[in-house]
Amino acid sequence: MFEIKKDTMISEIIENAPEAMPVFMSIGMHCMGCAMASGETLEQACYAHEVDPDEFLEKLNAHLSAQ
């Protein structure tokens, strides 16, 4: 399984774990392919969307481990 941490780039997540997309969309991150997403870390994206990065990371990893 691809390891995702707070400093993982969104573009890396899209490339290596596309099955993560529904979790991002569930918190309002709908522009995963936009220019900002390719240059942001998971933590930066969470802060931009007013989401706690630790809680989101836990939810994301739970989703991915269930796949």
Image (cartoon, rainbow, N blue to C red):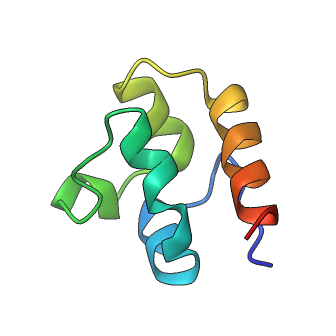
Using the image, determine if residue 19 lies above or below residue 48. below
The foreground one among 24 and 37 is 24
60 left or right of 37?
Answer: right
Q: Horizontal and vertical percent for residue 37?
A: 31, 56
Write the residue at 57% across / 75% down.
17
Using the image, determine if residue 31 lies above or below residue 12. above
Q: Horizontal and vertical percent for residue 67?
A: 73, 71
50 left or right of 32?
Answer: right
14 left or right of 28?
Answer: right
Outermost residue toward the front in this view: 66
Using the image, determine if residue 5 lies above or below residue 27. below
Q: Horizontal and vertical percent for residue 25?
A: 37, 46
Numbered disc total? 0
Question: Can you say which quadrant of the picture contains the N terminus?
Answer: bottom right
Residue 65: quarter of image: bottom right
The foreground one among 9 and 22 is 22
The foreground one among 58 and 40 is 58
Using the image, determine if residue 34 lies above or below residue 50. below
Q: Horizontal and vertical percent for residue 59?
A: 70, 40
Write the residue at 29% across / 58% down.
32
Residue 27: quarter of image: top left
